[in-house]
Amino acid sequence: MKIGIRTLASASAAVAVTAASALVAGAGPAAASPMVTTVVSGLASPRGIAFDGLGSMYVAQAGAAGPGSQGVTQTGNVSKYSLTSSGANLAWSTPFTSVYDTNPLGQKETLGPAGLSALGSGCQKNSPGNRRGCQVLTITSESVSGLTAGGAPADAVGEMGKLVRLDGAAGTKSTLADVGDQNYAWTGTHSYLFPPDFPDANPYAVLVTKGGPGGIRTFVADAGANTINEILPDGTARVIAYIPNETPPGFRDSTPTCIAQGPDGMLYVGALDLLYNLTIGPGHSNVWRVDPNSTDWQHNATVWASGLTTVGACAFDNQGNFWAAEMFAPPASASAPPGDLISFPFAHPIQSLTDPHALRVPVPLPGGVAQGPDGAIYATTMSPVPAPVGAVVRVTAG
Protein backbone atom coordinates (compact mmCIF):
# COMPACT_ATOMS: atom_id res chain seq x y z
CA MET A 1 0.00 0.00 0.00
CA LYS A 2 1.25 3.49 -0.81
CA ILE A 3 -0.14 6.81 0.37
CA GLY A 4 1.24 9.40 -2.01
CA ILE A 5 3.23 12.02 -0.11
CA ARG A 6 1.95 14.76 -2.45
CA THR A 7 -1.64 13.96 -1.61
CA LEU A 8 -1.19 14.17 2.13
CA ALA A 9 -2.65 17.39 3.47
CA SER A 10 -0.17 17.16 6.32
CA ALA A 11 3.34 16.04 7.09
CA SER A 12 4.92 14.25 9.99
CA ALA A 13 5.99 15.92 13.21
CA ALA A 14 9.59 15.34 12.21
CA VAL A 15 9.08 17.28 9.01
CA ALA A 16 7.58 20.08 11.06
CA VAL A 17 10.51 20.24 13.43
CA THR A 18 12.99 20.12 10.58
CA ALA A 19 11.15 22.85 8.76
CA ALA A 20 10.76 25.05 11.81
CA SER A 21 14.38 26.20 11.95
CA ALA A 22 14.29 27.04 8.25
CA LEU A 23 11.09 29.04 8.63
CA VAL A 24 11.94 31.10 11.71
CA ALA A 25 14.04 33.56 9.78
CA GLY A 26 11.13 34.34 7.48
CA ALA A 27 8.53 35.00 10.17
CA GLY A 28 5.96 37.69 9.45
CA PRO A 29 4.32 40.26 11.73
CA ALA A 30 4.37 39.77 15.49
CA ALA A 31 1.68 37.44 16.76
CA ALA A 32 -1.29 38.60 18.81
CA SER A 33 -1.63 37.72 22.50
CA PRO A 34 -5.04 36.08 22.83
CA MET A 35 -6.05 33.47 25.35
CA VAL A 36 -5.64 29.90 24.10
CA THR A 37 -7.23 27.23 26.31
CA THR A 38 -7.54 23.48 25.81
CA VAL A 39 -11.07 22.13 25.42
CA VAL A 40 -10.41 18.48 24.49
CA SER A 41 -7.12 16.55 24.61
CA GLY A 42 -5.81 13.08 23.76
CA LEU A 43 -6.71 13.20 20.05
CA ALA A 44 -4.83 11.30 17.32
CA SER A 45 -4.25 13.33 14.15
CA PRO A 46 -7.26 15.63 14.67
CA ARG A 47 -8.36 17.29 11.45
CA GLY A 48 -11.74 18.91 10.81
CA ILE A 49 -13.89 20.71 13.36
CA ALA A 50 -17.43 22.03 12.93
CA PHE A 51 -20.46 23.26 14.90
CA ASP A 52 -24.14 22.67 14.17
CA GLY A 53 -26.95 25.17 14.64
CA LEU A 54 -27.45 24.15 18.27
CA GLY A 55 -23.80 24.69 19.17
CA SER A 56 -22.71 21.04 19.30
CA MET A 57 -19.08 20.48 18.30
CA TYR A 58 -17.89 17.77 15.91
CA VAL A 59 -14.24 16.71 15.61
CA ALA A 60 -12.64 14.33 13.08
CA GLN A 61 -9.55 12.28 13.89
CA ALA A 62 -7.53 10.64 11.12
CA GLY A 63 -6.35 8.10 13.67
CA ALA A 64 -3.23 6.48 15.08
CA ALA A 65 -0.56 4.46 13.30
CA GLY A 66 -0.24 0.74 13.95
CA PRO A 67 2.79 -1.58 13.88
CA GLY A 68 5.00 -1.87 10.83
CA SER A 69 5.63 0.66 8.10
CA GLN A 70 2.07 0.68 6.74
CA GLY A 71 -1.33 -0.72 7.41
CA VAL A 72 -4.99 -0.21 8.23
CA THR A 73 -6.63 0.39 11.60
CA GLN A 74 -10.06 1.39 12.91
CA THR A 75 -8.66 4.25 15.00
CA GLY A 76 -10.15 7.06 12.93
CA ASN A 77 -13.34 8.60 14.29
CA VAL A 78 -15.76 11.49 14.31
CA SER A 79 -16.96 12.61 17.74
CA LYS A 80 -19.72 14.91 18.92
CA TYR A 81 -19.38 17.09 22.03
CA SER A 82 -21.64 19.43 23.92
CA LEU A 83 -19.86 22.49 25.26
CA THR A 84 -20.53 23.56 28.84
CA SER A 85 -18.99 26.04 31.25
CA SER A 86 -16.98 23.18 32.73
CA GLY A 87 -15.68 21.79 29.45
CA ALA A 88 -16.71 19.52 26.58
CA ASN A 89 -18.89 16.47 27.17
CA LEU A 90 -18.67 13.57 24.71
CA ALA A 91 -22.05 12.65 23.22
CA TRP A 92 -20.90 9.91 20.80
CA SER A 93 -17.86 8.77 18.85
CA THR A 94 -18.17 6.87 15.57
CA PRO A 95 -15.19 4.78 14.38
CA PHE A 96 -13.77 5.00 10.87
CA THR A 97 -11.08 3.26 8.86
CA SER A 98 -7.64 4.83 9.06
CA VAL A 99 -4.67 4.00 6.83
CA TYR A 100 -1.06 4.73 7.68
CA ASP A 101 2.19 4.82 5.78
CA THR A 102 5.79 5.85 6.41
CA ASN A 103 7.17 8.90 4.64
CA PRO A 104 10.71 9.20 3.19
CA LEU A 105 11.97 10.55 6.54
CA GLY A 106 10.84 7.40 8.30
CA GLN A 107 7.92 9.06 10.08
CA LYS A 108 4.44 7.55 10.10
CA GLU A 109 1.41 9.50 8.92
CA THR A 110 -2.27 8.65 8.81
CA LEU A 111 -5.29 9.35 6.63
CA GLY A 112 -8.89 8.84 7.65
CA PRO A 113 -11.78 11.19 8.41
CA ALA A 114 -10.63 14.64 7.39
CA GLY A 115 -13.03 17.48 6.61
CA LEU A 116 -16.25 18.13 8.54
CA SER A 117 -19.25 20.33 7.92
CA ALA A 118 -22.36 20.71 10.06
CA LEU A 119 -25.51 22.62 9.29
CA GLY A 120 -28.94 22.98 10.85
CA SER A 121 -30.60 22.89 14.25
CA GLY A 122 -32.33 19.50 14.07
CA CYS A 123 -29.27 17.52 15.10
CA GLN A 124 -30.60 16.22 18.42
CA LYS A 125 -33.25 14.04 16.76
CA ASN A 126 -32.81 10.55 15.37
CA SER A 127 -32.95 10.66 11.60
CA PRO A 128 -32.45 7.33 9.80
CA GLY A 129 -33.16 9.13 6.55
CA ASN A 130 -31.47 12.23 5.17
CA ARG A 131 -32.88 14.84 7.55
CA ARG A 132 -32.52 18.16 5.74
CA GLY A 133 -32.70 20.07 9.03
CA CYS A 134 -29.44 18.49 10.14
CA GLN A 135 -26.49 17.97 7.86
CA VAL A 136 -23.40 16.52 9.59
CA LEU A 137 -20.99 15.34 6.90
CA THR A 138 -17.42 14.10 6.90
CA ILE A 139 -15.14 13.27 4.00
CA THR A 140 -12.62 10.46 4.30
CA SER A 141 -9.26 10.73 2.58
CA GLU A 142 -7.70 8.81 -0.34
CA SER A 143 -9.64 6.41 -2.61
CA VAL A 144 -10.17 2.69 -2.84
CA SER A 145 -8.85 2.74 -6.41
CA GLY A 146 -5.68 4.56 -5.43
CA LEU A 147 -4.99 2.41 -2.40
CA THR A 148 -5.64 -0.89 -4.17
CA ALA A 149 -3.38 0.24 -7.01
CA GLY A 150 -0.69 0.49 -4.35
CA GLY A 151 -1.40 -3.01 -3.04
CA ALA A 152 -4.00 -2.49 -0.31
CA PRO A 153 -6.80 -5.07 0.00
CA ALA A 154 -10.06 -3.52 -1.19
CA ASP A 155 -12.15 -5.00 1.61
CA ALA A 156 -9.94 -3.35 4.23
CA VAL A 157 -10.03 0.16 2.76
CA GLY A 158 -13.57 0.27 1.39
CA GLU A 159 -14.50 3.28 3.53
CA MET A 160 -11.76 5.53 2.12
CA GLY A 161 -12.66 8.40 -0.19
CA LYS A 162 -16.32 8.42 0.86
CA LEU A 163 -18.62 11.29 1.74
CA VAL A 164 -20.42 10.11 4.85
CA ARG A 165 -23.43 11.52 6.64
CA LEU A 166 -23.59 11.11 10.43
CA ASP A 167 -26.86 11.01 12.31
CA GLY A 168 -26.75 14.02 14.63
CA ALA A 169 -28.34 12.20 17.55
CA ALA A 170 -26.54 8.86 17.47
CA GLY A 171 -23.62 9.18 15.05
CA THR A 172 -24.86 6.41 12.75
CA LYS A 173 -23.07 6.44 9.38
CA SER A 174 -24.56 6.45 5.90
CA THR A 175 -22.52 6.83 2.71
CA LEU A 176 -23.67 9.56 0.33
CA ALA A 177 -21.03 9.45 -2.42
CA ASP A 178 -17.83 7.73 -3.44
CA VAL A 179 -15.91 10.91 -4.16
CA GLY A 180 -12.44 9.37 -4.07
CA ASP A 181 -13.01 6.78 -6.79
CA GLN A 182 -14.86 9.27 -8.97
CA ASN A 183 -11.99 11.75 -8.76
CA TYR A 184 -9.41 9.01 -9.27
CA ALA A 185 -11.20 8.11 -12.51
CA TRP A 186 -11.52 11.78 -13.51
CA THR A 187 -7.80 12.42 -13.06
CA GLY A 188 -7.07 9.30 -15.06
CA THR A 189 -9.10 10.72 -17.92
CA HIS A 190 -7.44 14.13 -17.45
CA SER A 191 -3.92 12.87 -16.74
CA TYR A 192 -2.49 15.57 -19.05
CA LEU A 193 -3.16 18.10 -16.27
CA PHE A 194 -0.50 16.67 -13.95
CA PRO A 195 1.73 13.94 -15.41
CA PRO A 196 3.04 11.68 -14.00
CA ASP A 197 1.12 12.02 -10.70
CA PHE A 198 -2.38 11.50 -12.13
CA PRO A 199 -4.49 9.48 -11.57
CA ASP A 200 -4.72 10.57 -7.95
CA ALA A 201 -7.38 11.43 -5.39
CA ASN A 202 -7.48 12.52 -1.76
CA PRO A 203 -10.79 14.17 -0.82
CA TYR A 204 -9.96 16.33 2.17
CA ALA A 205 -12.52 19.07 2.88
CA VAL A 206 -16.30 19.27 2.76
CA LEU A 207 -18.67 22.23 3.01
CA VAL A 208 -22.45 22.22 3.20
CA THR A 209 -24.07 25.52 2.22
CA LYS A 210 -27.64 26.78 2.22
CA GLY A 211 -29.55 29.65 0.67
CA GLY A 212 -29.66 31.01 -2.83
CA PRO A 213 -31.21 29.30 -5.85
CA GLY A 214 -29.44 26.01 -5.18
CA GLY A 215 -30.83 25.45 -1.67
CA ILE A 216 -28.68 23.08 0.42
CA ARG A 217 -25.55 22.16 -1.52
CA THR A 218 -22.44 20.12 -0.75
CA PHE A 219 -18.89 20.81 -1.98
CA VAL A 220 -15.66 18.82 -1.59
CA ALA A 221 -12.03 19.87 -2.06
CA ASP A 222 -9.74 17.08 -3.26
CA ALA A 223 -6.10 17.57 -2.28
CA GLY A 224 -4.90 14.88 -4.66
CA ALA A 225 -7.02 15.62 -7.72
CA ASN A 226 -6.76 19.42 -7.22
CA THR A 227 -10.48 19.67 -7.83
CA ILE A 228 -13.47 21.33 -6.22
CA ASN A 229 -16.55 19.15 -6.63
CA GLU A 230 -20.22 19.72 -6.09
CA ILE A 231 -21.78 16.51 -4.83
CA LEU A 232 -25.17 16.12 -6.49
CA PRO A 233 -28.15 14.41 -4.79
CA ASP A 234 -27.50 11.18 -6.69
CA GLY A 235 -23.90 11.03 -5.42
CA THR A 236 -22.26 12.30 -8.59
CA ALA A 237 -19.12 14.36 -7.95
CA ARG A 238 -19.32 17.17 -10.51
CA VAL A 239 -16.03 19.04 -11.03
CA ILE A 240 -16.68 22.79 -10.82
CA ALA A 241 -13.06 23.95 -10.57
CA TYR A 242 -9.51 22.74 -11.04
CA ILE A 243 -7.06 24.53 -8.76
CA PRO A 244 -4.03 25.39 -10.92
CA ASN A 245 -0.99 23.35 -10.01
CA GLU A 246 1.52 25.46 -11.88
CA THR A 247 3.56 26.90 -9.03
CA PRO A 248 7.24 27.46 -9.99
CA PRO A 249 8.89 24.56 -11.85
CA GLY A 250 9.49 21.61 -9.59
CA PHE A 251 6.79 22.61 -7.08
CA ARG A 252 3.53 21.56 -8.73
CA ASP A 253 1.90 21.08 -5.37
CA SER A 254 -0.92 23.56 -4.76
CA THR A 255 -3.02 20.92 -2.93
CA PRO A 256 -6.44 22.43 -2.02
CA THR A 257 -7.30 21.56 1.57
CA CYS A 258 -10.30 23.66 2.62
CA ILE A 259 -13.44 25.43 1.44
CA ALA A 260 -15.27 28.34 3.07
CA GLN A 261 -18.24 30.30 1.76
CA GLY A 262 -17.62 34.03 1.72
CA PRO A 263 -20.04 36.87 2.44
CA ASP A 264 -20.52 37.20 -1.33
CA GLY A 265 -21.66 33.58 -1.72
CA MET A 266 -18.48 32.55 -3.52
CA LEU A 267 -16.28 29.66 -2.37
CA TYR A 268 -12.80 30.39 -1.00
CA VAL A 269 -10.31 27.54 -1.23
CA GLY A 270 -7.06 27.38 0.74
CA ALA A 271 -4.02 25.51 -0.59
CA LEU A 272 -1.23 23.75 1.28
CA ASP A 273 1.72 24.21 -1.15
CA LEU A 274 3.78 22.14 1.27
CA LEU A 275 6.89 21.51 -0.80
CA TYR A 276 7.10 25.09 -2.02
CA ASN A 277 6.86 26.57 1.49
CA LEU A 278 9.23 24.11 3.13
CA THR A 279 11.81 24.38 0.35
CA ILE A 280 11.73 28.05 -0.67
CA GLY A 281 10.35 29.64 2.48
CA PRO A 282 7.06 30.73 4.06
CA GLY A 283 4.42 32.89 2.45
CA HIS A 284 3.84 30.83 -0.71
CA SER A 285 0.30 29.55 -0.23
CA ASN A 286 -2.77 31.07 -1.86
CA VAL A 287 -6.50 31.30 -1.27
CA TRP A 288 -8.51 30.82 -4.47
CA ARG A 289 -11.94 32.24 -5.30
CA VAL A 290 -14.33 29.78 -6.98
CA ASP A 291 -17.82 30.44 -8.36
CA PRO A 292 -20.09 27.60 -7.16
CA ASN A 293 -22.38 28.11 -10.16
CA SER A 294 -19.73 28.04 -12.89
CA THR A 295 -19.78 25.39 -15.59
CA ASP A 296 -16.21 26.16 -16.73
CA TRP A 297 -14.01 24.09 -14.41
CA GLN A 298 -10.85 24.98 -16.33
CA HIS A 299 -11.11 28.72 -15.61
CA ASN A 300 -13.07 28.83 -12.36
CA ALA A 301 -10.30 29.62 -9.89
CA THR A 302 -8.60 32.98 -9.35
CA VAL A 303 -6.18 33.99 -6.60
CA TRP A 304 -7.96 36.04 -3.93
CA ALA A 305 -5.30 36.16 -1.20
CA SER A 306 -1.62 35.24 -1.10
CA GLY A 307 1.31 35.27 1.29
CA LEU A 308 -0.05 32.48 3.49
CA THR A 309 1.91 29.43 4.62
CA THR A 310 0.68 25.81 4.30
CA VAL A 311 -3.07 26.32 4.68
CA GLY A 312 -4.77 23.22 6.02
CA ALA A 313 -8.20 24.57 7.01
CA CYS A 314 -10.26 27.74 6.65
CA ALA A 315 -13.50 29.42 7.70
CA PHE A 316 -15.24 32.79 7.80
CA ASP A 317 -16.44 34.15 11.14
CA ASN A 318 -19.68 36.02 11.76
CA GLN A 319 -17.98 39.36 11.10
CA GLY A 320 -16.78 38.26 7.67
CA ASN A 321 -13.15 37.74 8.68
CA PHE A 322 -11.31 34.92 6.93
CA TRP A 323 -9.48 32.46 9.20
CA ALA A 324 -6.93 29.88 8.09
CA ALA A 325 -4.97 27.22 9.92
CA GLU A 326 -1.34 27.57 8.78
CA MET A 327 0.02 24.18 9.77
CA PHE A 328 3.70 24.97 9.33
CA ALA A 329 3.73 28.74 9.80
CA PRO A 330 6.97 30.18 11.20
CA PRO A 331 7.22 29.64 14.97
CA ALA A 332 8.02 32.43 17.40
CA SER A 333 11.34 30.77 18.25
CA ALA A 334 13.46 27.87 17.10
CA SER A 335 12.35 25.80 20.10
CA ALA A 336 8.62 26.37 19.54
CA PRO A 337 6.49 24.18 17.27
CA PRO A 338 5.38 25.73 13.99
CA GLY A 339 1.81 26.65 13.25
CA ASP A 340 -0.67 29.45 13.72
CA LEU A 341 -4.12 30.73 12.92
CA ILE A 342 -4.17 33.70 10.57
CA SER A 343 -7.09 36.07 10.12
CA PHE A 344 -7.85 39.07 7.93
CA PRO A 345 -10.96 40.99 6.85
CA PHE A 346 -12.87 39.91 3.76
CA ALA A 347 -12.50 43.47 2.45
CA HIS A 348 -8.69 43.31 2.77
CA PRO A 349 -7.41 39.95 1.52
CA ILE A 350 -3.70 39.83 2.22
CA GLN A 351 -1.16 39.76 -0.59
CA SER A 352 2.12 39.04 1.19
CA LEU A 353 3.67 37.43 4.25
CA THR A 354 4.04 40.82 5.93
CA ASP A 355 0.63 42.29 5.01
CA PRO A 356 -0.47 44.59 7.89
CA HIS A 357 -4.06 43.33 7.73
CA ALA A 358 -3.02 39.87 8.96
CA LEU A 359 -3.53 38.80 12.57
CA ARG A 360 -1.63 35.70 13.70
CA VAL A 361 -2.24 33.52 16.74
CA PRO A 362 0.36 30.81 17.55
CA VAL A 363 -1.26 27.36 17.63
CA PRO A 364 0.87 24.21 17.28
CA LEU A 365 0.38 22.36 13.99
CA PRO A 366 -3.30 23.22 13.53
CA GLY A 367 -5.47 20.99 11.37
CA GLY A 368 -8.95 22.52 11.56
CA VAL A 369 -10.61 25.84 12.41
CA ALA A 370 -14.19 26.96 13.06
CA GLN A 371 -16.10 29.61 14.97
CA GLY A 372 -18.03 28.32 17.96
CA PRO A 373 -21.48 29.34 19.22
CA ASP A 374 -19.83 31.63 21.77
CA GLY A 375 -18.06 33.63 19.05
CA ALA A 376 -14.64 32.17 19.94
CA ILE A 377 -12.44 30.45 17.37
CA TYR A 378 -11.77 26.75 17.87
CA ALA A 379 -8.91 24.81 16.28
CA THR A 380 -7.49 21.31 16.34
CA THR A 381 -3.78 20.99 17.14
CA MET A 382 -0.90 18.58 16.48
CA SER A 383 -2.79 17.45 13.41
CA PRO A 384 0.01 15.55 11.62
CA VAL A 385 0.94 13.39 14.63
CA PRO A 386 -0.58 9.86 14.54
CA ALA A 387 -0.55 9.53 18.33
CA PRO A 388 -2.95 10.82 21.05
CA VAL A 389 -1.22 14.16 21.59
CA GLY A 390 -3.66 16.38 19.66
CA ALA A 391 -6.28 18.68 21.11
CA VAL A 392 -9.05 21.16 20.47
CA VAL A 393 -8.22 24.66 21.68
CA ARG A 394 -10.39 27.76 22.15
CA VAL A 395 -9.02 31.13 21.09
CA THR A 396 -10.39 34.36 22.55
CA ALA A 397 -9.19 37.94 22.65
CA GLY A 398 -6.57 38.65 25.29
Image (cartoon, rainbow, N blue to C red):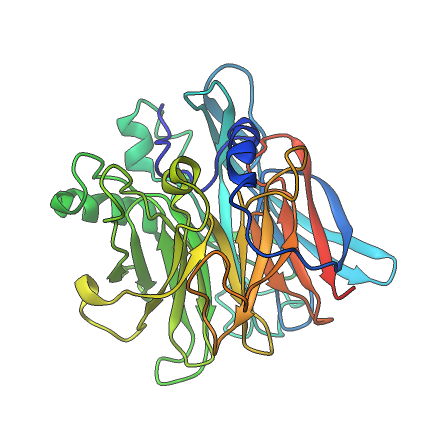
The residue lying at 71 percent from left, 66 percent from top is: 376
Does residue 305 appear to the left or right of 234 in the view shown?
Answer: right
Residue 155: image quadrant is: top left
The residue lying at 43 percent from left, 57 percent from top is: 307
Residue toward you, 105 or 309: 309
Where does residue 127 sit, x and y in percent of width and height? 57, 65
Residue toward you, 248 or 124: 248
Q: Residue furthest right?
A: 86
Q: Residue furthest front?
A: 25
| Residue 273 visible in this rendered orientation of the protein | yes
Q: Residue furthest top?
A: 68
Where does residue 214 sit, x and y in percent of width and height? 35, 80
Does residue 376 appear to the left or right of 215 in the view shown?
Answer: right
| Quadrant that contains the N terminus | top left
Where does residue 264 sit, x and y in percent of width and height? 42, 81
| Residue 50 visible in this rendered orientation of the protein | no
Residue 35: image quadrant is: bottom right
Residue 184: image quadrant is: top left
Where does residue 32 sit, x and y in percent of width and height? 69, 59
Residue toward you, 201 or 389: 389
The residue lying at 28 percent from left, 44 percent from top is: 181
Residue toward you, 92 or 284: 284
Q: Is residue 324 above or below residue 141?
A: below
| Quadrant that contains the C terminus | bottom right
> How many tags in the picture?
0
